[in-house]
Amino acid sequence: MAVGTLVVVMGRGAGRLVDEARAHCAVDARLVFPRRLSTRPVGGGQGEVYTSLTPAQFEMLRRTGGFALAWSVGGVHYALPRDIEEDAEAGRTVVAAGVPAVLPRARQVFGRVLVIDVGACGSAADLAERLDAIAADPSGPPAGPNSADWPGEVVGRS
């Protein structure tokens, strides 16, 4: 199991917020912001950075183990690449947008999972500040609610 932390940012606009936080934290080697993979067409992400795949490409990568985490929302498929597991094993903090459905698998793969609800974050600068604090703390994510229904630490859940 990995020694780093996976930060899953959830809620409306999470992908765009993660992209903005990436820009604020670009010089911090402790933080990794993987590019999400999606079957959403190029240009359909409302300013969000992602790699567009055809449904056939996505399914081939899923079958061959190319994803660390994968999920679907509204008929669109999303995934995080397998190489983020190496980043977590190296002790880095991996930050990505996701959904509650990925949390059980995320806990199996990464061990330490922190969930940030963007409804309570405010701005990209606020998220960047939180991520900086998370990456700087070798003991892991801050204490917070933890339950079988929401398997991860929750920051700012509204």
Image: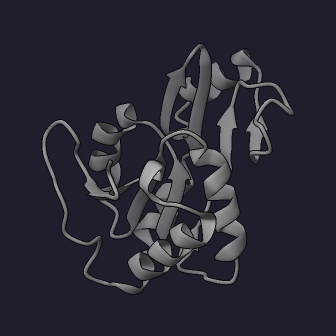
* x and y percentages locating residue 153 in the rendered image: 25, 57
Instruction: Tell me which residue sits at (19%, 69%) in the image.
Output: 143
Instruction: Tell me which residue sits at (56%, 27%) in the image.
Output: 62
Instruction: Answer with the quarter of the image where residue 116 lies.
Output: bottom left
Total labels drawn = 0
108 left or right of 63? left
* x and y percentages locating residue 129 in the rendered image: 51, 78
What colour scheme has been applied to the protein in the rendered image? one colour
Instruction: Tell me which residue sits at (60%, 81%) in the image.
Output: 29
Instruction: Answer with the quarter of the image where residue 136 lies.
Output: bottom left
Asked if residue 136 is positioned above or below residue 31 in the image, the reply reads below
Quarter of the image with the N terminus in it: bottom left
Is 1 in front, or is 73? 73
Instruction: Answer with the quarter of the image where residue 90 lies.
Output: bottom left
Instruction: Tell me which residue sits at (53%, 71%) in the image.
Output: 126
Residue 16 visible in this rendered orientation of the protein = yes
80 left or right of 140? right
Asked if residue 129 is positioned above or below residue 136 in the image, the reply reads above
156 left or right of 50? left
Is 138 in front, or is 59? 138
* x and y percentages locating residue 88 in the rendered image: 44, 65
* x and y percentages locating residue 119 in the rendered image: 46, 48
Asked if residue 93 is positioned above or below residue 145 in the image, the reply reads below
Asked if residue 24 is positioned above or below residue 38 in the image, the reply reads below
Is 56 in front, or is 31? 31
Is 11 in front, or is 106? 11
Residue 34 visible in this rendered orientation of the protein = no
